[in-house]
Amino acid sequence: METAIDRKKTTVMSENAKHLQSLVRDFDKTEEHCVLKIKLSLTRLVIKGLEEKGGTQSRLASELGYSMPLLHRLLHGDENWTVETAGRLLFAIGIDAEIKEMLDEKSD
């Protein structure tokens, strides 16, 4: 048998879930979201490139003259990527990358 306390808990949980969904929707429209997406994309490219080359993070850090802690911070999102850093990392693993603007066609 459901008690008044159980119903209240269910209501609060439902309201919290709706609030969280709203926060996530709002976050998608922020500058921070854009930055995190780019960092994640760069990290994926580097890791995928290393895997395909059979390389290691240690060897990559050594080739670039980076410390392992720096490379670790970059790949785990704890360090800001510069365009130069991104270019060096991608070049070192054999990826010729270019940034292209993607416009939302709905804004026409």
Image (tube, rainbow, N blue to C red):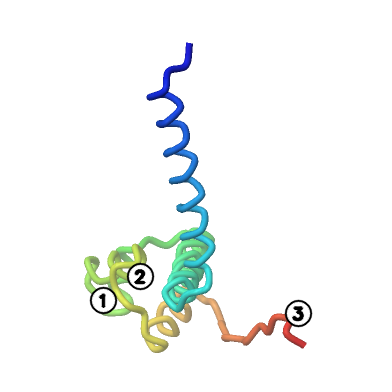
Q: Is residue 108 above or below residue 24?
A: below
Q: Position of residue 100 (x, y in %)?
A: 62, 86
Of the 4 image quadrants, the one containing the C terminus is bottom right
Q: Secondary structure at mark 3?
A: helix
The answer to whether the residue labelled 1 contacts the one labelled 2, judged by CB atoms less than 8 Å apart, is yes
Q: Picture coordinates of residue 102 (x, y %)?
A: 66, 83
Query: Percent from the top left, x then y, of residue 70?
Result: 25, 71
Q: How far is mark 1 from mark 3, CA to CA?
A: 43 Å
Crowding near the residue tagged with mark 3, few <14, some 14–19, many ≥20 C-alpha atoms within 10 Å:
few
Please tell me whether mark 3 or mark 2 is closer to you in this view. Answer: 3
Judge from the rendering whether residue 47 lies leftward or rightward of residue 65; answer left or right.
Answer: right
In depth, the one of 41 and 54 nearer the eye is 41
> Above or below — where is 71 with respect to 3?
below
| Crowd around label 1: few <14 · some 14–19 · many ≥20 (10 Å) | some
Judging depth in this view, the residue of 66 and 43 nearest the camera is 43
Residue drawn at 32 percent across, 76 percent down:
63
Which of marks 2 and 3 precedes in the sequence?
A: 2
- In the picture shown, does residue 8 fall above or below 49? above
Distance in Å between CA atoms under marks 3 and 2 = 41 Å
Q: Which mark is residue 106?
A: 3
Left or right of 102? Residue 14 is left
Q: Residue type at mark 2: give it.
A: Leu
Determine the residue positioned at 42% across, 81% down. Answer: 86
Mark 3 and mark 2 in contact? Answer it, CB < 8 Å.
no
- Indicate which disc residue 60 carries: 2
Please tell me whether mark 2 sits on a helix, a strand or a loop: helix
Q: Disc 1 residue type?
A: Tyr
